[in-house]
Image (spheres, rainbow, N blue to C red):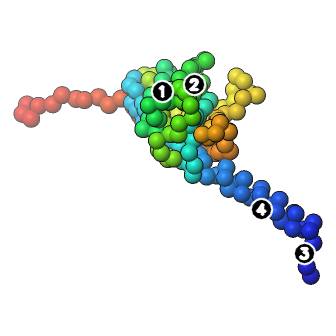
Amino acid sequence: MRPTVRSCGLICEVALLLAVAYDAGAQTIAVGNGWGVQGETASVPVTLTASADYTAVLARLEYDATALVNPSAAGGPLLAAAHALDFHSPQPGRVNVAVYPDSGMPAFTAQTGVLFTLSFDILPTARLGQSAIGFTTAGTPALPTSDLTDTTGAVALHQTRPGWVLVRGATTVRPWMLYE
């Protein structure tokens, strides 16, 4: 039996949908993992894994404000000199980070690597264990949790992955003497 034009059209549509789904999986913005001691600072990398050139990222993140406070962000090796990084914490437990070019549409320095590093102060009273950091639409549900923009200005399909900070207890250093 010969396939009809209609069945070929359906096959082509399915192939296109699979290609788009595959494309979405080829780009990932991931919050990494970090650790720190109660009362100290923890750093967590945010990475991009991609199969094409990109120029801008927006990440809307949430974290446990009973463990982590004072979020900040610093640019990573993927940012070119022409890129700017802004971050804002609209309320405890949330931080938005935007990476974008000052002018033009220069690509990041590579397709895979660290976009920026988040830093948090760990409260001295923070619960020990993992404190999650994930993507969110809280505050403005109409906005996406993240955006990834290519060098033509188009927003690309991508995946996101959450991360965490492992909170450890402070250790006490006991003085000792070899001879008592």
Measure how far apart labels 3 and 4 are at the Cα level. Answer: 16 Å
The residue identified by callout 1 is 73
The residue identified by callout 2 is 95
Check disc 2 and report its element: helix, strand or loop: strand
Please give the name of the residue rendered at 74% of the width and 58% of the height, measured from the top-left corner. Answer: 18
Q: Can residue 61 be seen at all in this image of the molecule?
A: no
Measured as percent of width and height from the top left, residue 97 is found at 56, 27
Measure how far apart labels 4 and 1 are at the Cα level. Answer: 40 Å
Marks counted in the figure total 4
- Sequence-first disc among 2 and 3: 3
Check disc 4 and report its element: helix, strand or loop: helix
- Sequence-first disc among 2 and 4: 4
Asked whether disc 2 touches disc 1, contact meaning CB atoms under 8 Å apart, the reply is yes
Going by the numbered disc 4, the residue's amino acid type is Ala
What mark, if any, has residue 12 been given in the picture? none
Q: Residues within 10 Å of mark 4 (few under 14, many from 20)?
A: few
Between tags 4 and 1, which lies in front?
4
